[in-house]
Every structure is written in C-alpha cells, then in structure tokens.
C-alpha cells in the first residue's frame, strides 16, 4: 500500500509538472491583469483570439503548451488571453488596432505597446521576440545597424540573415519592400564574401533554403550544392538536402516546360551526370529516374502547349511505371494544373481521362480534409460533365461531410456553400 501511495504521489507530481510547463494565462479582466503585472513588476503578454480562428487554435495547442515557452513567459510576463469578439473587449480591440488574428501584444504596465505581432508564429520566433522585449537580445533593427558597422563580421551577418524571414513577416507595405531589398542585397554580399564552398554547414544551408528558392540557367549556388553534395549530407542530413536540390531542379524544369523552352531536354541530361548521385537513389518503381522525370517533363511541356493527347500519354506512362512509389500529390498536381490552365473549363474529352487519377488520389488514406474535399469536388465536376449525375451527387455529398472536419471555420463555410451550389445545379 505504501508503494502504491508513493507511485500516486510521483504520478501526481508528474501531472503538475506537465500542467506548469505551459503558459499559465491569467483568469480575469484586462484591468486585473495590469494590476497583477504592476504588483509583480512584470510586462504583459496579450493573446487576442477568436473561437473560429484556426491559427489561434494552433498557437494555443502547439506553441503555448511547449515547456520552453511556458517557462520563459510565466517567469517574465503576466499572460492574458482576450476574445477579440467579446463585447467587453471591444474598447481594447479598437485601442490596439486588432485587425488580424491572432494579434500578440507585449505591453508595459501603462498599457503601452512594446511589441506587436500579427498572425501565428513558431515557438522560436515567439521566444526571440519575448527576449527582445526583455532586453536579452538585440532587436532586428539594432542588429542590422551593428552589421553595417562591423562589415567584416560574417558570423554577425549570418545571425541577422537567419532572423530576417521572421522579421520581414511582421512588416507591411513600404517597410516590407524596403527590408526585402536590404536583406536580398545582404545575402548576395554574404555569399560573395564567404564563398560557396565554405558554406557547407547547417546554418548556411538554412540561409540558402530561405533566400535561394529558384534555380537559374547558370546557377553557381545550385552547382555548388551538387558539387558539395556529400559534405552537405554529412552536415545537414540526406533528406533535407535531397528535398532542397530536387525542389530547385524540378521547379526549373517545369518553368522551362511552362514557357515552351525545349532546352529542358538538354538540362535533363544532368540526371545521367552529376545529379545521378541524388536522383539515382530515388525509387521510381519500374522506371529509372531519367525515364520518370522525362515522362513528367514531356507531359508538362505538352500540357502548356495544350497538346493534351501527348500530355495524357506521358502522364499515364509515368503513373503506370512509378505507381508503387507515388503519393497523393503526384496524382492531384497534374489535375490542378490542367484545370488552372483552362480556368476550370477543360476540354470535354479530358474529363473522362482525369477521373482515374482523382479516384487513385482518393485511395490514399492519409490526406488533409481540405485536400480530400477539393478532390471529391473535382471528381464530382468530372462525373457531372460525363453525364453521371448520380455519382457526381455522391461525390458532392461526401465532400460536404468531409469538409465539416476543416478546423478553419470560415474556410469550411465557404467550401460548403460552393458544394451546395454544385448540388443545386445538378
């Protein structure tokens, strides 16, 4: 019995630690929170939210509950959650110009804004901003001024660049444009001064991912990534390095195809050359990497030339050969591109051809409810155009049911209105 009691005490203490690890929000009015902050000589952290706000819920569930966030905020702030739609908070919403949700404010005890954040943020960003308020780290603007003074300090420049995306995300209008230009120029000079072959480390790889998101025809950054591939794999990990290189290369090939540039054929020869170390290890079912990517490229090239027979021929060869290795996005992507190209009104003979692709996509068990709803609607549209109104109605009804699980209530309502409109038109 003694051991059972001891176990219960340990379990209860564990539960207490779990609860205290998250942000403890003050339960009371804003005025009471201010009074508490004065008494404890702390700043205030205010989370303006709404019950329907999906990003607000994600912050509450995935960020405010983290131990490192809870520990820091409970120690340094009186934290308060305010419903932006509650009548009693109307004056505060107007005073602090809460126009987006969530709006996160750091205030002093006079109610003056020390820092304002619009929209959901990752835990690292939120913690960094809180430390700026507490004076533990430099603000982005002050760090930028320090970088300008210490022009040879590459480590300082790297630190600023790593923080830049989060900071720029808080800016609007002219200020945002100004900082985008400044940081773009700073990144270019950083790469030139440090040289690409000395950037084989996790921090600089993160910068490349942030600031170099498109491959150019003669691209020294892409070529350096490929040249130093093994080093990046050792420093960063194969999965992330492969994902980045493949996204750059595939994006470039698709852009060539979309713009009708037949030179994509010449570019694809790299798959049998320096890119074989990356693509050669990727499974494509019965196809080689060279065959698979060529089918895709030929398909997209002809799609954007509106040679749909050749588009479908190549895509079906790709699907048939690589079927065991494909994901839901492999099937939905070409359909979305087709509908986008024709602004929702694809040629009559195309509807029947995309139905098997959509049905295959729906066979995947793991798919976001938003995507499943969208695919069901597309399938319903295709079935309707082929004259099968019974199955079309089934798809729309199923899409309506699935869409009810979408967390963003505004998006859910919009989608369900669209589905109801389609049902009414049958």
Image (tube, grey):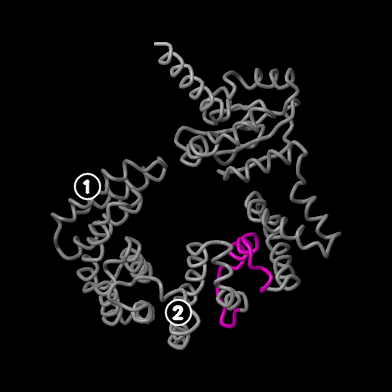
Q: Is disc 1 surrounded by few (<14), some (14 to 19) or many (20+) residues within 10 Å?
A: many
Relative to 336, residue 131 above or below:
above
Does the stretch in magenta take in 4? no
Position of 31 relative to 190 (above/below) = above
Q: Horizontal and vertical percent for residue 261?
A: 46, 85
Q: Give the tally of numbered discs.
A: 2
Which residue is disc 1 drawn over? 397
Q: Tell me the quarter of the picture where residue 235 sits.
A: bottom right
Q: Quick check: is 215 in the magenta stretch?
A: yes
**Extreme residue toward the top, this view:** 1
Name the foreground residue: 55 vs 138. Answer: 138
* Mark 1 or mark 2, earlier in chain: 2
- The answer to whether the residues at label 1 and label 2 have Cβ atoms under 8 Å apart is no
Report the residue at 37% width, 46% height from top: 414
**Screen quadrant of the N terminus:** top left
Would you place residue 84 above or below residue 10 in this image?
below
Q: Position of residue 220 (x, y in %)?
A: 62, 78
From the viewer's perspective, tell me whether residue 395 is left or right of residue 168. Answer: left
Residue in view at x 67 percent, y 56 percent: 162
Residue marked by disc 2: 276
Give residue 195's mark: none
Q: Is residue 129 above or below residue 338?
A: above
Query: Residue 250: where, in percent of width, then height?
Result: 46, 73
Query: Viewer-proximal residue, 43 or 258?
Result: 43
- In the picture, measured across the screen, residue 412 lies left or right of residue 276, that is left
| Magenta stretch bounds | 197-219
Q: Secondary structure at mark 2?
A: helix
Distance (Cα) linking label 1 and label 2:
46 Å
Disc 1, SS: helix
Packing grade of label 2 (10 A; few <14, some 14-19, many >=20) is some
């Amino acid at each position: 019995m003694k051991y059972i009691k001891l176990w219960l005490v340990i379990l209860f203490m564990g539960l207490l630690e779990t609860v205290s690890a998250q942000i403890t929000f003050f339960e009371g009015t804003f005025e009471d929170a201010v009074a508490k902050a004065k008494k404890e000589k702390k700043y205030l952290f205010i989370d303006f939210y709404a019950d329907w706000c999906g990003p607000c819920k994600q912050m509450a569930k995935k960020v405010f509950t983290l131990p490192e966030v809870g520990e820091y905020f409970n120690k340094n702030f009186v934290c308060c959650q305010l419903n932006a739609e509650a009548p009693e908070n109307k004056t505060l919403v107007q005073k602090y110009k809460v126009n987006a949700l969530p709006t996160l404010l750091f205030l002093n005890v006079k109610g003056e804004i020390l820092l304002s954040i619009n929209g959901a943020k990752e835990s690292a960003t939120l913690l960094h901003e809180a430390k700026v308020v507490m004076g533990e780290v430099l603000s982005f603007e002050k760090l930028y001024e320090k970088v300008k003074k210490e022009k040879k300090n590459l480590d300082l420049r790297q630190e600023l660049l790593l923080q830049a995306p989060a900071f720029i995300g808080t800016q609007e209008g002219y200020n945002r444009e100004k900082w985008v230009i400044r940081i773009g120029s700073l990144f270019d000079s950083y790469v030139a001064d440090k040289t690409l072959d000395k950037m084989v480390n996790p921090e600089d790889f993160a910068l490349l991912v942030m600031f170099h998101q498109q491959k150019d025809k003669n691209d020294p950054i892409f070529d350096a990534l490929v040249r130093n591939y093994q080093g990046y794999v050792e420093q960063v990990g194969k999965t992330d390095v492969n994902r980045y290189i493949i996204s750059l290369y595939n994006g470039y090939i698709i852009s060539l195809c979309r713009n009708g540039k037949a030179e994509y054929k010449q570019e694809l020869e790299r798959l049998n050359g320096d890119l074989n170390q990356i693509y050669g290890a990727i499974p494509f079912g019965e196809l080689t990497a060279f065959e698979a990517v060529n089918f895709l490229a030929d398909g997209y090239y002809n799609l954007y030339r509106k040679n749909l027979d050749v588009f479908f021929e190549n895509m079906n060869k790709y699907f048939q050969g690589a079927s065991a290795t494909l994901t839901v996005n492999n099937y939905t992507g070409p359909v979305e591109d087709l509908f986008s190209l024709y602004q929702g009104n694809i040629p009559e003979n195309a509807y029947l051809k995309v139905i098997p692709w959509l049905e295959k996509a729906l066979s995947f068990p793991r798919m976001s409810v938003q995507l499943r709803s969208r695919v069901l609607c597309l399938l319903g549209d295709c079935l309707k155009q082929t004259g099968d109104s019974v199955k079309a109605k089934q798809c729309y009804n199923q899409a309506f049911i699935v869409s009810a699980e979408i967390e963003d209530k505004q998006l859910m309502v919009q989608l369900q209105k669209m589905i109801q409109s389609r049902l009414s038109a049958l």
